[in-house]
Amino acid sequence: MKSTRSMVLVSADPESMDRGALDVFTELQKQIIEFGLEEEIALSMVNDISKPGFVPLVLVYPDAVIYGPIKPGDVHQIVEEHLYKGRVVEEKQISPYNLSGRIAWLSARKGTLPAENRIVLKNVGVIDPEDISDYIIHDGYQALGTVLNDLTPEETIALIKKSGLRGRGGAGFPTGLKWQFVNTAKGEKKYVICNADESEPGTFKDRLVLEGDPHAIIEAMLISAYAVGADEGIVYIRGEYGLAISRIKIAIEQARNFGLLGKNIFDTAFNFDLHIHAGAGAYICGEETALIESIEGNRGEPRSRPPYPTTAGLWQKPTLVNNVETLANIPAIIRNGAEWFQSIGTDSSPGTKVFTILGNVNVTGLIEVPMGITLREVISIYAKGMKNGANFKLAQTGGSSGSIIPSSLQDIPMDFDSYKKAGVSLGSGALLIANDEVCVVDLVKVLLNFFRNESCGKCYPCRIATPRAYEILTNISEGIGTMHDLDILLTMSKHLVELSLCGLGQTAGSPLKDFLTHFRAEVEAHIKLKVCPAGVCPMSGRRTY
Amino acid sequence: MPIKLKQEQDINHYIRALADEKGHEKAELIPILHEINAELGYISDDAIKALSEQMKIPTSQIYSVVTFYRMLSNEPRGRHVIQFCESAPCHVAGGRKVLLKLQEELGLTQGETSQDDKWTLITTSCLGICGVGPVMIIDHDIYGNVTPDQVPEILSHYD
């Protein structure tokens, strides 16, 4: 496992490059290797941070120390004193007055390391997912042994509660508490379900875990089943994930052959078996009650709650539903302890989060970082800046069910509570990053098109408002919207959020509000001036739906 | 996808065998429908009727399930099914232009099947391959980072 102690960033805007940033970077590379620190220190270049005349800059995390302007000749001292011996080189630090506002925020980040820290994805790409022995060599099923032999179900739940783990499906509900609800629910027969119906646009973290580390999910489900008193489990995987389905199938077969599924596991009285249910293509089935309906052979329409699945779920029995990413944290928490887990991330949201980075950036892909990283850090460090040096306009978090984050909110720590306080939501961890060429009207139109297709049609607010909002947005994009339309959109947003039966309708309302809160001028330009500032909307002056 | 069984009798026989193999519980309905869809290319009214008798579930309920899920189809589809992702990440990465090109090349709009039964074009929500958008899937082949220029070449691989 790659663990990074420090992270060093070199500014790479055009002026820095003119003044020798590349030489500084090469020298840093050389010196870091000379001091034998290449395993512990990550080095990269970032754009968009300097103020003219005081470049190149060298930033050192987690201390949040900024050096500048730096010449190749200064590098040796910084590496030796700061990176090797751990002493800040005071005289090379840049005065805060010479920093641009863009990085003044950095000093507030002291002590946090936005470096990758892999818990969920620890084994992904490292082990052979089709070989159980490889998983066992990498500490696999050790946590299960600990739980079955040394802990009672109640102690297991207490441990998970203490760790502060929160559901990674999007809502952020405390996992230990959910386990406790199922544990204390009345009933002989109980179920555990792994929600692997990952359909959130822009999210593919769960697929990578299922494909790369399927036994971790099986182990976590065994542990959760023991904790809540269930003897049967179902992995609900979306039907489109062919490879994930076949990998989980193989893993279940192998676990059964090793006696890890079935009766008297580890020679205890604990019995558990697991099977797969493949979805048939419906976003709504990621909602837990719709998922349960789907397993029962029905249309995937959410149920009214209460009762919650924790008391009356699958076949009306107490049922625990956990997301793949949530489960993937469980074995590591048992092995390393609750304190270890709490030491990562923020106080209210311990642990890491897997983010998928998408859109108009230089590097797209998947990262696992401690909770509390900011959007700006993600863009500058991991996405290597905006493509073609364009301006960051907005980010759409969490697939369709998150929020639209304007650039003014990019320095908010990404954890459940900080985002909630700012009135936005983290969602499932997809970060769709957009530049100035993206039109908000067009983007929200695409989002509403998604919701109108995926609405199950059970409750009125969602069934009626999502297509109607799409029609209004289409009109605006064709240059025939009215100012009154905006009031209607806001009313719809309110109704969707307050009156919908499930999360789909509730989140369908948020982009309608977000884009009018943060980008009202741009929307009004479509209506009053009949111009799309980004040049994306057709503006044909005709009704097209 | 080949349509192997056309005769009503064959379908009855096939579905009885399938239900016997999988079980007659309602929980097996969707897995069975998956199988039928893969085998026949779509779930015909005859198949729904036969399944209804086997599993003792009203045809209306089976029909409502078939039409609910995107991966199940109640209508015949072409030999090759093109699924094009129209969710936001692919859209932002330039998906709209690729879709327009596809529609132009095929002479189809979304949901349509070509006269010669070769192509069916459907637009779909996120396929979970967003790192390489715009994404499309033809049958079981996945294409990522698709540009409009590549469309004719990709289509030419299928007959």
Image (cartoon, helix red, strand yellow):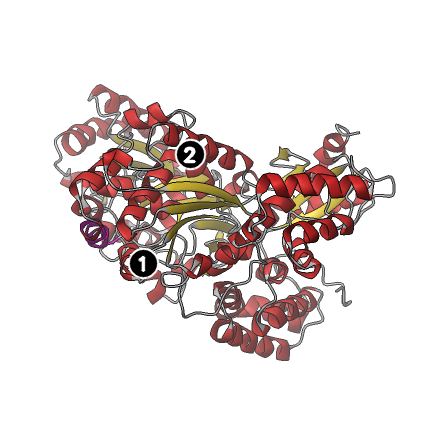
Crowding at mark 1 (Cα within 10 Å: few <14, some 14-19, many 20+) = many
The reply to whether the magenta stretch includes residue B15 is: no
Q: Is residue A21 left or right of residue A394?
A: left
List x then y, in percent, for residue B133: 58, 41
Q: Which residue is mark 1?
A: A182
Q: Which residue is mark 2?
A: A252
- State which chain disc 2 sits on: A
- State which chain disc 1 sits on: A
Which amino acid does the dot numbered 2 rest on? Ile
List x then y, in percent, for residue B89: 55, 48
Q: Earlier in the sequence, mark 1 or mark 2?
A: 1
Q: Is residue A8 above or below residue A154?
A: above
Residue A156 or residue A311, whichever sits in front: A311
Q: Main secondary structure of the magenta part?
A: helix
List x then y, in percent, for residue A26: 33, 25
Q: How many marks?
A: 2
List x then y, in percent, for residue B97: 70, 46
Residue A289 or residue A382, whichever sits in front: A289
Q: Is residue B7 left or right of residue A59?
A: right
